[in-house]
Amino acid sequence: MIKRGILIGLCLGFLLTGCDLIEYHPYDVRIDGETNINLKNIEKIQQQCAGKDTIRFAFMGDSQRWYDETADFVKHINKQDSIDFVIHGGDISDFGITKEFLWIRDIMQGLRIPYVALIGNHDILGNGKEVFEQVYGDENFAFIAGNTKFVCMNTNALEYDYSHPVPDFDFISREAADSARYSKTVAVMHVKPYDDQFNNNVARLFHAEIKKFRSLQFALHAHNHKLQTTDVFKDGIIYYGCASMKQRNYMVFTLTTNGYSYEVVNY
Amino acid sequence: MKLSIIKKIIVFVLLLMVAYSLTAAETYSPGVEKYHRVWNHLIPRYTKLQYAGSMGFMSVGTGWQYGSNHQWETDLLLGIVPRYSSKRAKATLTLKQNFMPWNVELNDRWSLEPLACGLYVTTLLDNEFWTKEPEKYPSGYYGFSTKLRANIFVGQRLSFSCDKNNPNKKVTLFYELSTSDLYFISAATNKYINPRDVLSLSFGVKLQLF
């Protein structure tokens, strides 16, 4: 009888505390909490940077399975007071599992400044793409901060077949033709041309198309887990690559009316 | 086309012959008895229904129990994962091995298995998930399977005997705490991830009728 009492007590205990212990499947795309983050944060970025000549933003990526390091990154960024926003260059998750996106989301929601996130190749695994779309939004998106436009593109072509356009040249053309008020552009992607994931048959075409963006300053990418500065097409348009969270550093870019500068911050 | 029709006819005739030989063998001989005994062992003796546990919203299946005190059980479960925010609902198949080392008789009706443990492998029946990386990737690119998950679990079970004269007729209620391979790796390498983040609680019932 005592044993039965203990058992019933245990069961009740689990029932009362176990609500967040219920999982139907790691890939169930059952999402609670904040969704559509990119659109909400873009509104904040556009508002907070409106009319500013100088903007500063942090660029990081590949948080994957480095939760402790990403949490430390958030703490470090929160101590800075001159950074306007953060761009996560993709590979939010490691396995495309629903909970991974929510763990990183909850860590990144600790930022005092707004952030946007791109889709990385790991985020497409299983049905990760559907989680990304729910939590963050469209795979291709753009926003204006101050007088700079940021065009963020899905370039993880190896994860798709030809039924889905990666990179999406229609999107790129639309952004190039955009007549909104801004004076320069920064291109952002997870994988840069000539890396393993990119559709390298169109690498040159892609570069030619993004050069049609109004006064393209430089391009940003993640994916390779190391700091990189590459003049991929030898034409002065630099592709800057950030390290992964494992390396415990991030890049800070400062855009002014005269040009731009960047630094690497270790934490 | 013609060949497949001929194949079908041959299979049909063979099946007829097997069915005929079985009915003809109703006159018992030791060989037939042994044949029946072997197949009898393979008849599943119970039905299981399990809620959650990272193998589907609800899973239903059957299985086999063996060992001197029926301390081993092997289940085959079919589960359903609702659509939620994904493109479609998905089915899962689970192969589960249970081990219950002790059985404590509480009274003539109730008994408790204070520890149930084991492992199970789930597979997602959906073509966007793969067991082996597709050939388009350089070898070992991701190094894991999105389709197969290995899980370990511990739990407890409480049984009620429906018929005092037949110990095999009983209803068993159980709960389990489990985690899967990828969650285990994530929790083991990060202080940020608590056991609570990666544990999955499930409840189930086992109905044994004979």
Image (cartoon, grey):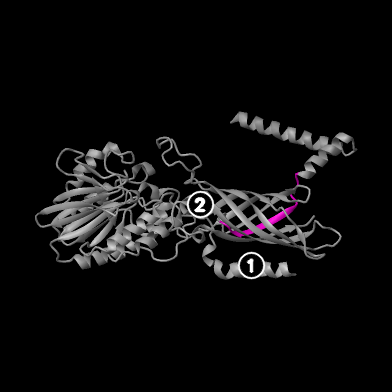
Q: Amino acid at mark 2?
A: Phe
**Which residue is depicted at the point 55% across and 55% down?**
B54
Does residue B85 appear in the picture of this structure? yes
Q: Would residue A162 be found to the left or right of residue B195 on screen?
A: left
Q: Which residues are magenta?
A: B42-53
Q: Going by the image, does B144 lie left or right of B104?
A: left
Q: Which residue is mark 2?
A: B184
The quadrant of the image that shows the N terminus of chain A is bottom right
Give above or below for B50 relative to A242: below
Which percent across, then down, holds residue B11? 70, 33
Question: Mark 2: few, some, or many residues within 10 Å (few <14, many ≥20)?
Answer: some
Residue type highlighted by circle 1: Cys
Q: Is residue A261 left or right of residue B171?
A: left
Say yes or no: labels 1 and 2 on the same chain.
no
Foreground pick, A170 / B97: B97
- The front one of B102 and B60 is B102
For image coordinates 80% across by 55% down, the residue present is B210
Q: Which residue is mark 1?
A: A11
Name the residue at the left extreme.
A258
A62 w.r.t. A43: above or below: above
What residue do we see at 29% from left, 60% from top? Answer: A76
Q: Residue at x 16, y 38 (%)?
A: A234
Q: Position of residue A259 (x, y in %)?
A: 11, 53
**Subunit ID for the residue under disc 2:** B
The number of numbered discs placed on residues in the rendered structure image is 2
The spot of residue B185 in percent (x, y) is 48, 50
Question: Residue B44 in magenta?
Answer: yes
C-alpha span from label 1 to label 2: 24 Å
